[in-house]
Image: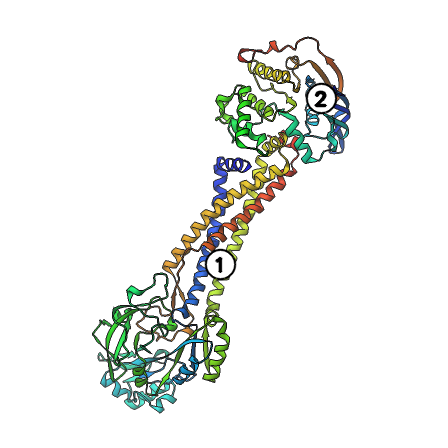
């Protein structure tokens, strides 16, 4: 079904801790249509990051299946998952996770480095991505020379430089003040408007409020699936140039 | 592009990179220096014969060491000069040249009287060992005037009343008509080939003429020690004086081809008084493949006690000296290289450990394990290449510098200069440690090998990292 772009069926993820087993996710089933703006909310340890990692192909479920765009991720080997992450998914992490030895430009170029293709084309794509997040003027700076907001915008640029269909953002505003948080959420909203499926995981209700659909996790279990009516509340965070 | 990224990563982590490069460079420098010096030693050995313009040296050895005022060097026996012609007729021989090398003792009239020895052709002296001959001479001459000195050399009473050891001049009778083969390859200074470090030259005066008889060329060292110049008269043996017609530089030649004075062969034979004989035949082969056949032929010609010296003989003669040093140094180099490799592997592992988070990010954004692996291999290769390049340069410089100050001493068996000869360091072969592209490449290759091993270890470690675990680490 076209609506069911991301489908999780009875996904359980357990970790072995000494003699016991800890369930980070337990029998989670959900489906997300293509182009939806989704929030995953829950307390720390509820399984939000695990769920994002499984959808992003960084982790595999202990049980159950994950299908994205008709592809069963369980059928992919490590190299196949890497290609899936490269072509389909863009990650935005809480602390940006930029490589400190590389400039902003080089960090955004990082996903393109192993790809075949001309340097000119790659450079153009990086410049476009930098412009999209309004950080082009800091392209030659090292991450240590940037503010938290600028670092996170760079991370967003890195996430979109491959033009992925899915953006997974794990606590993308966790380290930011409200102004910068608003800018990031506005950016993510804009990416969603471009047709990308954007999934934000956060414990912050205000952050999740910008999304159209919210999955609530508790102790690894999916406890609610609330579709929101009307416009997402981006205006709550939006300020300055990030305003829509 | 991955290589560019690897280079940036290598370049911007300067402290770590500098330490790794320095470690590799020092290890490679040691290896290159050792190999350079070792190779120069081997070159010096092979140049021993090249300096003689020969591939083979034929001699006859005897145990007895009779004392005469004009005598053969210890342990050398005379060979009929006809053997030179017969050797030349062998199909594998390009050219053969006979040389009569002599020790010529010069004494005053009173000393000669005291010795009471016929100076040439004395059967009694020939049959007696040096010490006995000297003792006999002493008995004939009266106690206190002559005695046996060190190394079998005679001692005589000097004008100052002190006993002193008689020193011979090492004289080589050579064929003046041949300049391409013989004890030394002589030529005018201006004809000297700069590349041919084993060549020697007439530095003053002229070379011997075919018509010369009592004319001599002397080495620069001998001339300096004796205060001789071209035109001076040089006494050789008890009766003869030679006009010095030229000075020669044999500093680049091997002892096996050297002497202190060079005179016409016919004159030397006359001094020796045993007819047309030689004691050393220098042989130039058409091909080194003929070496064995010619050596066997020469042994058959000379008969018992034939001594055939080829490059391999010289190498064997110096093996005990050179191999211990060479093997020890190579063992040390191998150990240091191994240590460098382990250090590089350890460093590469640390590099991965410190960049776990970065590896996690790479994997999250779609780098395959092989991509991450290639990155670490490339970074290690850059470190190894830089270290290898620096080390090769440093090692070449060290090897070259060593060659400037060091000589290779040959074993005494290859030397029969008198112990107190005026020629300095007669056993030494010069080391020519010219930079070699082969050794240079060897150094870089060694560095690349250890770098690749380290890179592969790091690559394997990075590939094993779970991306979610890696992202959690700070």
Residue linked to disc 1? B329
Give the x, y percent position of residue B55. 43, 72
Give the x, y percent position of residue B9. 52, 35
Q: Is residue A15 left or right of residue B258?
A: right
> Of the numbered discs in the image, which one, if any, rests on residue A46?
2
Chain letter for the residue marked with disc 2 in the picture: A
Q: Is residue A154 left or right of residue B82?
A: right
Q: Which element type, helix, strand or loop, lies under badge 2?
A: loop
> Of the numbered discs in the image, which one, if any, rests on residue A220?
none
Of residues A193 and B464, the one drawn nearer to the viewer in this rendering: A193
Q: Residue furthest left?
A: B231
Q: Quadrant of residue B128?
A: bottom left
Give the x, y percent position of residue B16. 50, 39
Quadrant in which the C terminus of chain B is drawn: top right
Of residues B142 and B54, the one drawn nearer to the viewer in this rendering: B54
Q: Quadrant of residue B380?
A: top right
Real-space Cα distance between discs 2 and 1?
Answer: 64 Å
Give the x, y percent position of residue B195. 37, 61
């Amino acid at each position: 079904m076209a609506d069911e772009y991301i489908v999780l069926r009875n996904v359980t993820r357990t970790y072995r801790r000494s003699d016991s087993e800890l369930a980070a996710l337990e029998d989670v089933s959900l489906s997300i249509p293509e182009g939806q703006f989704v929030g995953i909310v829950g307390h720390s340890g509820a399984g939000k990051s695990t769920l994002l990692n499984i959808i992003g192909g960084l982790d595999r479920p202990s049980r159950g299946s994950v299908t994205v765009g008709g592809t069963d991720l369980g059928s992919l080997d490590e190299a196949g998952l890497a290609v899936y992450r490269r072509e389909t998914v863009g990650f935005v992490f809480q602390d940006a996770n930029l490589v400190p030895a590389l400039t902003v430009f080089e960090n955004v170029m990082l996903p393109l480095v192993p790809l075949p293709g001309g340097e000119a084309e790659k450079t153009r794509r990086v410049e476009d991505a930098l412009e999209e997040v309004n950080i082009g003027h800091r392209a030659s700076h090292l991450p240590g020379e940037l503010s938290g907001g600028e670092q996170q915008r760079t991370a967003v640029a890195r996430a979109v430089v491959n033009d992925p269909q899915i953006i997974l953002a794990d606590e993308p505003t966790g380290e930011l003040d409200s102004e910068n948080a608003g800018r990031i959420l506005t950016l993510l909203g804009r990416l969603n408007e471009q047709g990308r499926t954007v999934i934000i995981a956060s414990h912050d209700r205000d952050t999740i409020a910008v999304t159209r659909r919210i999955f609530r996790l508790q102790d690894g279990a999916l406890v609610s699936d609330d579709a929101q009516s009307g416009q997402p509340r981006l205006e709550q965070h939006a300020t300055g140039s990030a305003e829509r | 592009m991955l290589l560019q990224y690897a280079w940036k990563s290598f370049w911007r982590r300067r402290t770590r990179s500098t330490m790794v490069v320095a470690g590799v460079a020092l290890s490679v420098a040691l290896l290159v220096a050792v190999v350079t010096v070792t190779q120069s030693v081997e070159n010096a050995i092979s140049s021993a014969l090249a300096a003689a313009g020969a591939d083979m040296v034929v001699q006859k050895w005897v145990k007895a060491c009779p004392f005469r005022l004009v005598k053969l060097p210890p342990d050398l026996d005379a060979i009929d000069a006809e053997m030179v012609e017969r050797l030349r007729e062998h199909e594998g021989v390009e050219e053969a040249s006979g040389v009569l090398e002599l020790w010529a003792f010069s004494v005053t009239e009173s000393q000669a009287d005291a010795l009471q020895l016929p100076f040439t052709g004395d059967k009694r002296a020939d049959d007696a060992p040096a010490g006995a001959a000297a003792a006999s001479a002493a008995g004939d001459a009266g106690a206190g005037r002559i005695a046996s000195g060190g190394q079998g050399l005679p001692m005589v009473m000097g004008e100052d009343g002190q006993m002193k050891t008689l020193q011979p001049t090492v004289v080589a009778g050579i064929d003046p008509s041949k300049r391409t083969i013989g004890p030394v390859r002589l030529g005018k200074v201006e004809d000297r080939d700069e590349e041919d470090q084993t060549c020697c030259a007439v530095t003053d005066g002229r070379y011997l003429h075919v018509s010369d008889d009592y004319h001599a060329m002397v080495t620069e060292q001998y001339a300096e020690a004796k205060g001789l110049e071209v035109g001076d008269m040089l006494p050789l043996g008890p009766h003869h004086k030679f006009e010095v017609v030229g000075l020669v530089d044999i500093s680049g030649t091997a002892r096996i081809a050297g002497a202190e004075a060079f005179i016409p062969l016919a004159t030397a034979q006359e001094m020796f008084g045993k007819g047309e004989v030689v004691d050393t035949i220098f042989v130039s082969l058409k091909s080194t493949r003929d070496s064995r056949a010619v050596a066997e032929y020469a042994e058959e010609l000379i008969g018992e006690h034939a001594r055939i010296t080829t490059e391999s003989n010289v190498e064997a003669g110096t093996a005990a000296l050179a191999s211990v040093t060479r093997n020890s140094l190579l063992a040390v180099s191998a150990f240091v290289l191994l240590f460098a490799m382990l250090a590089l592997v350890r460093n590469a592992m640390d590099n991965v450990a410190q960049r776990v988070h970065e590896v996690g990010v790479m994997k999250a954004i779609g780098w395959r394990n092989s991509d991450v692996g290639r990155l670490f291999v490339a970074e290690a290769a850059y470190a190894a290449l830089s270290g290898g390049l620096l080390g090769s340069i440093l090692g070449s410089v060290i090897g070259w510098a060593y060659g400037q100050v060091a000589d290779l001493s040959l074993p005494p068996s290859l030397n029969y200069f008198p112990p107190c000869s005026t020629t300095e360091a007669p056993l030494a072969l010069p080391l020519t440690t010219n930079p070699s592209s082969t050794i240079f490449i060897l150094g870089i290759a060694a560095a690349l090998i250890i770098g690749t091993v380290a890179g592969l270890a790091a690559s394997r470690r990075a590939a094993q990292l779970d991306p979610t675990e890696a992202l959690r680490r700070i």
